[in-house]
Amino acid sequence: MALVAAAHAPPAGAGAPEAAARPFALGDVRLLDSPFKQAMERNALYLLSIEPDRLLHNTRRYAGLEPKGESYGGWEAHGIAGHTLGHYLTALAQQYAATGDARFRGRIDYIVAEMALCQKAYGDGYVGALPPLELQTMRNFREGIVEPQGPFNFRGGAWVPWYTEHKVLNGLKDAWVLGGSAQARDVALRLADWVDAITAGLGPDQLQAMLSVEQGGMMDVLVELYVLTGNPRYLAASRRFYHRAVLDPLLARRDELPGKHANTQIPKVIGEARTYEATGDTNARDIAAYFWALIAHHYSYVIGGNSENEHLFPESTMSRHLGANTAETCNTYNMLKLTEHVFGWDPRADYADFYERALYNDILASQEPRMGMFTYFMSLKPGLFKTFSTPFNSFWCCVGTGMENHTKYGEAIYFHGRDDLYVNLFIPSALTWRETGLAIEQRTDYPVGNQTELTVTSEPAAPIAIRVRCPGWASGPLTFDLNGRPLGLAGTPGGYAVVRRAWRKGDRLRVTIPMSVRAEAMPDAPDKVAFVYGPVVLAGDLGPAPRTATVPYAEDQDANIDAPAVPVPALTRHGSALESRVVRSTDGSLEFRAEGLGLPRDLVLRPFWEIRFDRYSVYWDVVGERPADAGRTPAASRP
Ligand SMILES: [Zn+2]
């Protein structure tokens, strides 16, 4: 049985391996109050503020139908128009699946019905919002005409048509599978048939030329359609999106990633991951596992994001890549997807550790709290600030993936095997595991507190092993008590602690996770460090960012890349370990003070996700021993 989000998906092909751990359907996990639930609710309001007729403007217009609303601005007014509509469908479907809120289902039904009309008007199975140049580029594939012009365009400047069309097809698939729309199934499969038709006649060299231009997750969505329908034509079509120049070196375990556009590559590897799940192709599995380890362990900043100016660079140069354009948020969205796959095959704590790091310190940190707007880059330039989208005039790629991010926080808290439950994240939530009868509630103020408590609210018919992640960063073994009595479990950091029993309603399993402050150095620069408390990346709060026409909200994702940063204090060693001088406040918050470390002044540190409108630094230069007269002279601040 393949790993698919849909509980009612049919089995994949005969070669499909059995997953060791599978995610639950979104509807099986309900968030309880936490910053994640608040982010989800904020995002839901934004989703409801979008007018479907405006997002459908280009879809109707290019199909020859009168638009019913004005076009939106930003990227929706360019050649990539329509990508947002696809992301929006996925976000609506996930929100609906997670909450059952009929307002989201109503929007799905309306949009899909409109798209069905447009598909009929086009007449050949295509539907989307591609402008004439981009659509003609696609139709030319059927004639054997493939004319790439750099990594993001075809002849004439046609901008990433496959990337855009992937969002549309994936949105329709989600409207079907998660949103329950039968009409979406029909529209999606007709569109997939069109994709098959325009690519079926291309030879291997033509296909590879086509794939030199960013194509999003085309392989991924086609494999999933194969799993959902059992139709081998979709599997065959998906294999046409195997990009040899990127995936062959990964299969040979050669790291040729430096210099490559990051977010172009991650979805290709997700496609390979799903191919393994659907077919048992172990080459596809090896590519995915190797790539995951490279990105997570060698290309990621402390917040879990990767890339500068959207491109990957050698780990040996990371400390020189702390500019304004670091960590495109889409990349992290995609790395979390990939992490769910590799975890499913091999449920290891380090996979879940990475997921937690990137979820708290990048994804949660990417949303601002007033309007639920999104970051594109997550700047790690010391002394700069975050730049967020505008509601209706940005529509960057990261707005699209951002809309999805905050609808699916329930997705990776728990996983399950046949009779074992993985508790990966300590996020307040209620889980119903229908197949076993087990229901639990997890209540916690983690990471403010260092405990979480699981209460059984419905007892299962048979014994179940609850496997609790013991984070690799924990400063000592986790401890456990059951109904107030200590359990003699190892709780070794970096593994899972297993409690197997016949669970009874009312059973309470309390987990205590030792946390401390750590200084994590850059891989290439031992004197450039970030502070982390448990799972929480701490950023120095450097005071309010200026309000300007592009701060904090910008139509252009690059609007503030040349904005001046403020000077950032440096740190001195002061004879002892740095982390021992980073002290938590006594008011119960996650505010810390670096005492006697900063030059020319000391630092106040808070969770990176709590810094939205202030200047900040995540990384700090360590400049040797603190001079005896420090603090009394106006020492120059370091850049
Ligand atoms: Zn993006």
Image (cartoon, grey):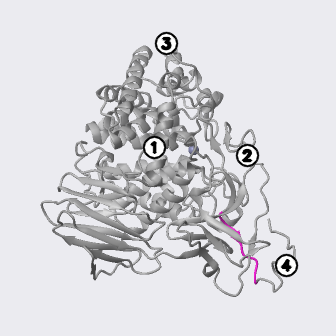
As measured in the structure, the alpha-carbon distance from the residue carrying label 3 to the one carrying label 2 is 38 Å
Which numbered circle lies on residue 560?
2
Q: Around disc 1, counting alpha carbons within 10 Å, would you say few (fewer than 14), some (14 to 19), or many (20 or more)?
A: some
Nearer mark to the viewer, of 2 and 1: 1
9 and 627: which one is in front?
Answer: 627
Q: Quadrant of residue 438?
A: bottom left
Residue reaching furthest left? 461
- Residue hosting label 1: 41
Q: Report if residue 306 is visible in the image.
A: no
Question: Cβ of disc 2 within 8 Å of ligand 1?
Answer: no
User: SS of the residue at dot 1?
Assistant: helix
Separation of marks 4 and 1 at Cα, in angstroms:
48 Å
- Find residue 632 and name its label: 4
Residue type marked 1 = Glu
Q: Identify the element where label 3 is drawn.
A: loop
Judging from the image, what secondary structure is the residue with disc 2 in? loop
Instruction: Report the side of 347 relative to 11 (left or right).
Output: right
Classify 591 as above or below 157.
below
Q: Which mark is residue 65?
A: 3
- Tag in front: 3 or 2: 2
Q: Amino acid at mark 2?
A: Asn
- Determine the residue positioned at 50% across, 70% down: 534
Image spot of residue 631 (x, y percent): 81, 78
